[in-house]
Amino acid sequence: MKTKMKTALLAIAVLAGSASVQAADGTVTFTGSVHSGACSIKPESVDQTVPLGAIAKHQLQSGGQSNPRPVLIKLEGCDLSGLTDNTVTTTFTAAPSTVVPGAIGTVGSAGGVGIMMSHGGSLVELGKPTAPQIISTGDNTLEFGAYVKGAATDPIIPGDFSAVTNFTLAYQ
């Protein structure tokens, strides 16, 4: 009986001691959403940053532009069973530029610039769906381009800039 009592007390002491060793060193936050689309959007594509580089002022003067950079929206687990055309369109929305027509407006100390987006050689119009892209079952990547465009007549002011656009996918 004494052995059982000692074993029970030892077990309680071990459990109590191990509880005091555990400490919180940080947190993990999980986020996401559930939608009714035909594909899931990979996490790295939901909220992404596209570096456009440090662009020389002279390259943007008189409506000049920087080199385009890829903007990729990666889809996974696509199920086309409910679609008729097996396509998807993308609509980008943003605050428009006040100095570069058709461009996404920027904020920051740089001036006289806007962000243009392209798809398949055509300019993306803010608020309007792009041309349909064919998708297949499984994983797909929607490819776009983005570049900085200078104002045609306003001065280009050196400095930092940023811009944000949202996208919405529509499956057909």
Image (cartoon, rainbow, N blue to C red):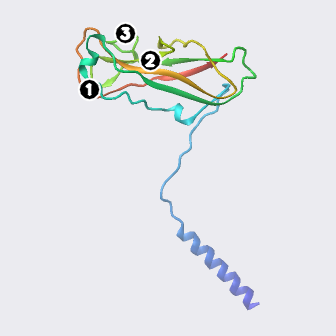
Instruction: Give the quarter of the image for residue 13.
Output: bottom right
The numbered dot on residue 101 is 3
Instruction: Give the quarter of the image for residue 31.
Output: top right
Tell me if label 2 and label 3 are in contact, CB under 8 Å: no
* Precedes in sequence: disc 1 or disc 3: 3
Toward the viewer: 11 or 156?
156
Q: Comparing marks 1 and 2, which lies closer to the viewer?
A: 2
Give coordinates of residue 27: x percent, y percent: 50, 52
* Precedes in sequence: disc 2 or disc 3: 3
Residue drawn at x 49%, y 23% is 166
Does dot 3 land on a helix, a strand or a loop? Answer: loop
**Please, what is the three-letter code of the amino acid marked with disc 2?**
Met
Question: Would you name the residue on which mark 1 appears?
Answer: 109
**Please, what is the three-letter code of the amino acid marked with disc 1?**
Ser
* Precedes in sequence: disc 1 or disc 2: 1
- Measure the C-alpha gap from mark 1 to mark 3: 20 Å
- Measure the C-alpha gap from mark 1 to mark 2: 21 Å
Vertical comparison of 159 with 29: above or below: above
